[in-house]
């Protein structure tokens, strides 16, 4: 599959509320499952919890995090491409905040442009990630949260992505390597897109084509 077709396939899946896998051969998180946060529902959140480390994060523009009063965690690098913010739960309509239903509801609200700071309790179970404005302006390359954010925004017009790293089944103490990630994606019929290709697309080096090329489907 060409790079443009791979990107279009990922966008189609995210638009439909389905997951994609972003592969980063060189990064600390070699592969992450990504869903557009605005489409996150309980079954998909449960799938992410089962198939990943269980730590669900939501990539958001840093300007949105500032508006929602989600400051960086103490000790994070202030000039990094992305930094963890204070964890949140939805303030109303959820239980303990840890269930798949609760975390999906929190993710959807984080993606809602009408959300207010008072909609969330802190600290809690869903970890926002602040993606630097310089990344969105293409002044530096995409990291994993930035790539997830840009794909979700292009697919849904909501700049918010729910993502989690995929652990290794062969070596439980490690994250999955490229071979295992490709095998995992094939078993679950999940499209794979390389982080470097997303970065080139984000910078305008890879045009998008027809969404009809995507054949991936159910998890």
Image (cartoon, rainbow, N blue to C red):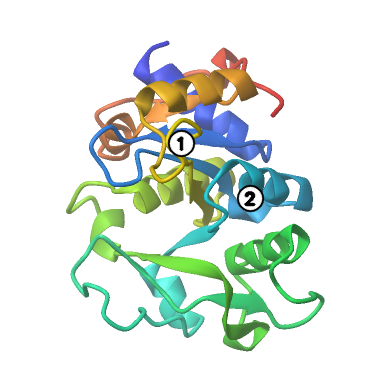
Query: 68 or 41, which lies in front?
Result: 41
Looking at the image, the residue that sits furthest to the top is 1
Residues packed near mark 2 inside 10 Å, few (<14), some (14 to 19) or many (20 plus): some
SS of the residue at dot 1? loop
Q: Which residue is labeled 1 in the image?
A: 168
Which image quarter is the N terminus in?
Answer: top left
> Up-down: is 60 above or below 93?
above
* Marks 1,2: beta carbons within 8 A: no
Query: 64 or 178, which lies in front?
Result: 178
Q: Earlier in the sequence, mark 1 or mark 2?
A: 2
Looking at the image, the residue that sits furthest to the bottom is 118
Count of marks placed on residues: 2
> Up-down: is 100 above or below 70?
above
Which image quarter is the C terminus in?
Answer: top right
Could you tell me which residue is drawn at 51 percent across and 60 percent down? Answer: 58
Is residue 208 rendered to the left or right of residue 78? Answer: right
Q: Position of residue 120 (x, y in %)?
A: 63, 82
Q: Position of residue 20 (x, y in %)?
A: 53, 34
Could you tell me which residue is drawn at 71 percent across and 26 percent down? Answer: 218
Is residue 25 rendered to the left or right of residue 117? Answer: left
Could you tell me which residue is drawn at 52 percent across and 57 percent down? Answer: 160
Q: In which quadrant of the rendered view does residue 80 lie?
A: bottom left
- Distance (Cα) linking label 1 and label 2: 14 Å
Q: Position of residue 78 (x, y in %)?
A: 22, 75
Q: Which residue is labeled 2 in the image?
A: 49
> Up-down: is 84 above or below 72?
above
Q: In which quadrant of the rendered view does residue 137 lie?
A: bottom left
User: Which one is closest to the eye, mark 1 or mark 2?
Assistant: 1
SS of the residue at dot 2? helix
Could you tell me which residue is drawn at 26 percent across and 56 percent down? Answer: 135
Q: Position of residue 76 (x, y in %)?
A: 27, 75
């Amino acid at each position: 599959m060409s790079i443009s077709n791979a990107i279009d396939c990922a966008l189609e899946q995210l638009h439909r509320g389905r997951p994609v896998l972003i592969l980063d051969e060189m990064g600390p998180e070699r592969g992450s499952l990504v869903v557009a946060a605005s489409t996150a529902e309980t079954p998909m959140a449960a799938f992410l919890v089962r198939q990943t480390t269980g730590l669900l994060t939501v990539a958001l523009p840093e300007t949105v995090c500032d508006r929602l009063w989600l400051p960086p965690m103490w000790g994070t690098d202030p000039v990094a491409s992305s930094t963890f913010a204070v964890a949140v739960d939805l303030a109303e309509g959820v239980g303990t905040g840890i269930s798949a239903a609760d975390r999906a509801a929190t993710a959807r609200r984080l993606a809602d442009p009408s959300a207010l700071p008072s909609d969330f309790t802190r600290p809690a179970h869903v970890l926002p990630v602040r993606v630097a404005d310089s990344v969105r302006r293409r002044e530096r390359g995409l990291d994993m949260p930035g790539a997830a954010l840009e794909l979700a925004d292009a697919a849904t017009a909501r700049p918010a992505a729910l993502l989690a790293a995929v652990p290794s089944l062969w070596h439980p103490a490690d994250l999955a390597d490229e071979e295992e990630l490709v095998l995992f994606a094939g078993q679950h019929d999940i499209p794979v897109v390389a982080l470097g290709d997303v970065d080139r697309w984000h910078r305008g080096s890879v045009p998008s084509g027809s969404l009809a090329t995507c054949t991936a489907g159910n998890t």
